[in-house]
């Protein structure tokens, strides 16, 4: 075999090396051609987003200020873990300290942290020997406004925490208005000291224009107050105007741009229904319709349910429907040795006996002779003007004492008490065993729960 024939027939090793080299080169070139072109970022239209709340305020808390309703209080008792906890000052101005199953209410509204610590220590002395108590403020209600806008007028809507010097321009700048926002017709709604709401139109566009050449009118950029509500409409141009309705407040699904229908005309009941209906805490008797160029309308939804069709008004384009919340004075409060405690709607005149018995009545061992009604006489929350009405519920039940008429905002308290250790088979334990036996018996037969099938609420 000559040398040319040997070269023309390479051995297996040489062939394998050539294949490996070829595959490697091909693999190095393949990604260059298989790379996908970079994807473009999708651009979506700006829509209002409910966030927040936005905060324009600071987080500094003055620790020496008197406690007010809604304050979050940190209570520390030396050597005791259970009463050491965080409590919120309720509408009655109280915090309810928990210790070994006992609920102890302490009136702290209007007291400084040091004064409140002394009052809490007095309340705990029957249960803790020489309690050493300290208190501090963890959080306070912040001045808050609410901003709403339909049809992409703002990038952010919802609550905004403000400072004492926050202006309308500051708030809307934080909310980031768009080119669709009509700043010449901003609606500012405010409640006065008597609780009356008024709405005025503010021309913020004129204020912005004036800043470039002449001094601006500060009335066009008013400072904001706690509870203010701001509504920014869209610019009226072509089809952009007059085709939406806003439903906000105590509804299940707030609507910022509910489609407006003309045939047949949309009513307030239909608009609220499309928002999912009202929540349990809604003030259905004072629903507002805010209409551009007119005064707010007050609608009673309960009267509509009762057959009064005159309240089921027709909605107009760009109407804003606001379902408010019950005010604190539409509730009464029950705590202590009662089967069901908490906040309850004040829907009709009610007596002390009705308030207690409708909520399950006193629990076993409750000290029915040691009851108190806290009646807060001052709207500003001054604790020195709180009226304390003591009562003996046993004597009221026997007709020896006059029943007490409960007023909105009243706080009812009965000392829970503790079971005596020397009476293991007292009447209450026997009744409890009988009740448990009846519950199991009825569960087996499918007859409900307890001695009957009546439900509570």
Image (tube, rainbow, N blue to C red):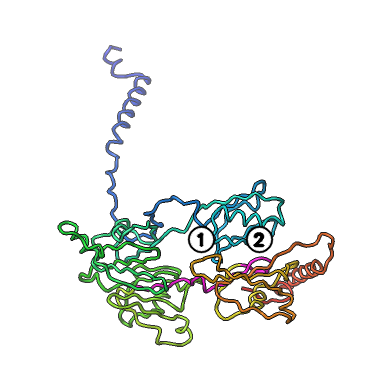
> Gap between marks 2 and 1, in whole Å?
19 Å
Q: Position of residue 149 (x, y in %)?
A: 32, 65
Secondary structure of the residue carrying numbered label 2:
strand
Near-viewer residue (226 or 309): 226
Residue 395 percent coordinates (x, y): 74, 77
The image shows residue 145, relative to residue 330, as above or below, that is: above
| Quarter of the image that includes the N terminus | top left
Give the image location of residue 140, x and y in percent: 48, 56
Instruction: Assess whether residue 325 is covered by the magenta stretch.
Output: yes
Residue of label 1: 68
**Can residue 181 be seen in the rendering of this structure?**
no
Which secondary structure, mark 1?
loop
How busy is the neighbourhood of tag 1: few (under 14 within 10 Å), some, or many (20 plus)?
many
CB under 8 Å between callouts 2 and 1?
A: no
Name the one closer to the observer, 321 or 341: 341
Where is mark 2, residue-wise? 104
Specify whether 343 is left or right of 178: right
Nearest the viewer among 12 and 298 is 298
Compared with 251, 71 (above or below) is above
For this rendering, which residue is in front, 440 or 277? Answer: 277
Count all numbered tags in the image, as a single digit.
2
Residue at image x 46%, y 73%? Answer: 278
The magenta-colored residue range is 320-341
Q: Is 448 inside the magenta-drawn segment? A: no
Residue furthest to the top: 2
Q: Nearer the viewer, mark 2 or mark 1?
A: 1
Residue 59 in picture, x, y percent from top left: 43, 50
């Amino acid at each position: 075999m000559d040398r040319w024939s040997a070269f023309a027939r390479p051995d297996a090793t040489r062939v394998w090396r050539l294949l490996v080299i070829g595959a490697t080169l091909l693999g190095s070139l393949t990604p260059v051609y298989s790379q996908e072109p970079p994807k473009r970022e999708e651009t979506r239209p700006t829509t209002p987003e409910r966030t927040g709340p936005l905060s324009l305020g600071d987080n500094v808390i003055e620790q020496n200020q008197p406690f007010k309703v809604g304050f979050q209080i940190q209570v520390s008792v030396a050597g005791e873990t259970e009463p050491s906890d965080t409590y919120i000052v309720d509408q009655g101005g109280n915090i309810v300290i928990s210790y070994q199953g006992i609920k102890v209410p302490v009136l702290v509204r209007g007291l400084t942290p040091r004064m409140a610590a002394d009052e809490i220590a007095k309340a705990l002395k029957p249960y803790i020997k020489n309690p050493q108590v300290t208190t501090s403020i963890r959080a306070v209600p912040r001045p808050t406004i609410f901003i709403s806008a339909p049809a992409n007028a703002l990038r952010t809507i919802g609550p905004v925490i403000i400072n004492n010097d926050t202006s309308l321009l500051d708030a809307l700048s934080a909310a980031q208005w768009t080119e669709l926002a009509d700043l010449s017709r901003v609606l500012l709604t405010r409640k006065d000291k008597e609780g009356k709401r008024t709405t005025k139109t503010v021309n913020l566009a004129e204020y912005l224009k004036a800043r470039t050449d002449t001094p601006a009118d500060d009335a066009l950029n008013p400072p904001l107050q706690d509870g203010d509500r701001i509504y920014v409409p869209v610019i009226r141009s072509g089809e952009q105007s007059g085709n939406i309705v806003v439903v906000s407040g105590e509804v299940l699904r707030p609507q910022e741009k509910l489609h407006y229908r003309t045939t047949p005309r949309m009513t307030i009941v239909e608009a609220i229904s499309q928002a999912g209906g009202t929540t349990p805490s809604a003030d259905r008797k004072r629903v507002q319709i805010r209409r551009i160029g007119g005064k707010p309308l007050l609608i009673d939804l309960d009267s509509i349910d009762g057959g009064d069709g005159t309240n089921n008004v027709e909605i107009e384009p760009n109407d804003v429907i606001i379902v408010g919340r019950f005010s604190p004075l539409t509730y009464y409060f029950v705590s202590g040795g009662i089967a069901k405690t908490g906040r309850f709607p004040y829907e009709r005149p009610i007596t002390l006996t009705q308030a207690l018995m409708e909520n399950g009545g006193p629990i076993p061992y409750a000290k029915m002779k040691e009851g108190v009604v806290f009646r807060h006489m001052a709207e500003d929350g001054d604790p020195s003007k709180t009226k304390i009405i003591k009562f003996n519920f046993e004597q009221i039940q026997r007709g020896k004492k006059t029943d007490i008429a409960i007023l909105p905002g009243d706080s009812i308290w009965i000392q829970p008490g503790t079971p005596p250790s020397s009476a293991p088979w007292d009447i209450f334990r026997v009744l409890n065993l009988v009740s448990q036996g009846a519950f199991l018996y009825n569960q087996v037969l499918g007859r409900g729960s307890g001695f009957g099938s009546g439900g509570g609420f």
